[in-house]
Image (spheres, grey):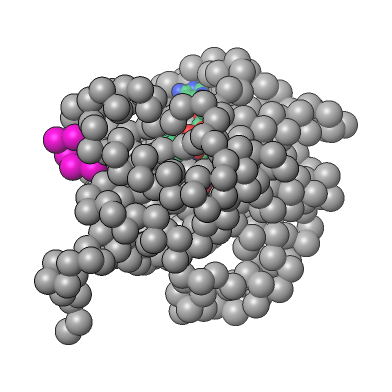
Amino acid sequence: MPQPAGSTSVEPAPFSGRVHVLGAGPVGLLLTALLQSTDGVSVRLYEKRREYSRTRMVQLASFLVADSIDAYCHDHIDDESVVAIFDPQELSELLAFRRSIPPDLMDLLRDWTLGFCPLKAIERSLSDLIDARATSVERTTAVVTAQDAMAMLEPGDALIDCTGSKSVLRDHLAPGAGGVDDGGNTLKIRLEYALVVTFLYGQRYDCNEYCKYLKNADNPHYKFIPMVNRTHYDGSVSHVTGIVNISAEDYEAMPSQFDGAWLRGNFPRVTESMDRFINKVKEETHGELLGDLEIVRIPLDLYRARHATSREWRTSGQSDHPFARSPVFLAGDSAIGSPYFQSISLGFECAMYLAGLLARRDVPMRDLLDRYELYMYKQWLRVYMRSKMIKHNKDLFESIDEPLALLEKLHIY
Ligand SMILES: Cc1cc2nc3c(=O)[nH]c(=O)nc-3n(C[C@H](O)[C@H](O)[C@H](O)COP(=O)(O)OP(=O)(O)OC[C@H]3O[C@@H](n4cnc5c(N)ncnc54)[C@H](O)[C@@H]3O)c2cc1C
């Protein structure tokens, strides 16, 4: 007969060192590369895609390769938040783990914090590095379901879900809470709808806060907000990415991906706004747009798994469930998702912490689960505050030429 919840706690079998990583996107690959070089750990990596083809340009945050607490906290949006949330001891442990990362991997991370690169380049480099190392990783190409994942677990195994925003296991980690189909373990906050617009420009173009304003001065709506200080010039071409805020109705009326020609035919007001912005860039820098705009429409959601591990199963009274006996962790977008071009760095940060925990064979598994939950909660607080700050600043920017609309958005006390 099932025991009442909370009455007993199932003790997971001691960690055998075998880890199943589901999903070989950037976070699953980084975790695999970190665990691969950890003594006593063997990794099985599962991925459904056969090729890495995602072209979007991404950049990693410099805190990933920080070598001091000052450097780690240095951020123009949330440096105080980091100090407020994390204890000095925790920060020291994070940095100590960074120092232990093998040079082949650290060199790649350092490169990716310097400028933009295509997501597929990060994925391919990590994947090649894993394959080239002496310690082999068992790789399987397959779509893994939650049932498959439960069936593959043997006593002592650990399972890490890195399957991204549509995580295979997230909603299976909350026994009885709302059910899997209701997203019972997912807290989601929709911040806004947006177009992510990317274009190539045949001249150097560096954007700062002032140009963001001046180039939108004649755009009352649909302002294009580029990633300030993060346009990437590769020697002949600038890669520019930014966001245009759209309404829920606009979002519904658009396909998920399209180009500038489609936008021109269907949303002329957004096109005019983009044209004004790009024409001002041209006036200043005398270059040309190369090719067409690439546009993706996305809801900008901030979400987290309320439980980032299978800890709840241990006290659920269902001791024969695989997740009660074996530890399961979520990492990357499967655990926390945030908009505004920050998710990969957050996912990498959490992967480093988790790899550091699993290397600690002296710590009982129940303590590892507790520590990871606490750490993920702190990361959630950090990214929640950071994202709200970015959104608030964006809202103010949208109304910058209308004092009354601006005042309405200023909640002071
Ligand atoms: C348009 C756009 C632009 C972005 N720009 C940036 C940016 O500039 N900077 C930034 O930091 N972030 C950016 N992001 C977010 C970033 O791409 C994600 O945060 C990142 O890819 C998450 O990595 P992940 O490994 O956690 O998940 P994913 O990249 O989603 O990888 C999950 C992996 O799991 C595999 N998988 C899924 N289900 C299964 C299954 N059932 N069986 C087997 N394999 C499975 C998938 O094939 C995939 O390889 C952007 C996102 C979008 C949509």
The residue at the point 50 percent across, 45 percent down is 282
Q: Nearer the viewer, residue 95 or 205?
A: 205
Q: Report whether residue 351 is seen.
A: no
Compared to 133, does 15 lie above or below? below
Compared to 104, does 7 lie above or below? below
Q: Report whether residue 37 is seen.
A: yes
Q: What is the count of numbered marks?
A: 0
Residue 219 placement (x, y as % from top left): 27, 52
Residues rendered magenta in the picture = 246-250
Snapshot quadrant of residue 272: top left
Residue 83 placement (x, y as % from top left): 52, 78
Q: Nearer the viewer, residue 60 or 202?
A: 202
Q: Residue furthest right?
A: 134
Left or right, residue 356 beside residue 4: right
Name the quarter where the N terminus is drawn: top left
Q: Nearer the viewer, residue 285 or 46?
A: 285
Residue 247 belongs to the span the image colors magenta: yes
Left or right, residue 396 beside residue 29: left
The residue at the point 47 percent across, 37 percent down is 198
Left or right, residue 60 beside residue 217: right
Q: Nearer the viewer, residue 329 or 386?
A: 386
The residue at the point 14 percent across, 67 percent down is 405
Residue 194 belongs to the span the image colors magenta: no
Q: Residue furthest bottom?
A: 413
Q: Mainly helix, strand or loop, the magenta region?
A: helix
Residue 249 placement (x, y as % from top left): 14, 35
Name the quarter where the C terminus is drawn: bottom left
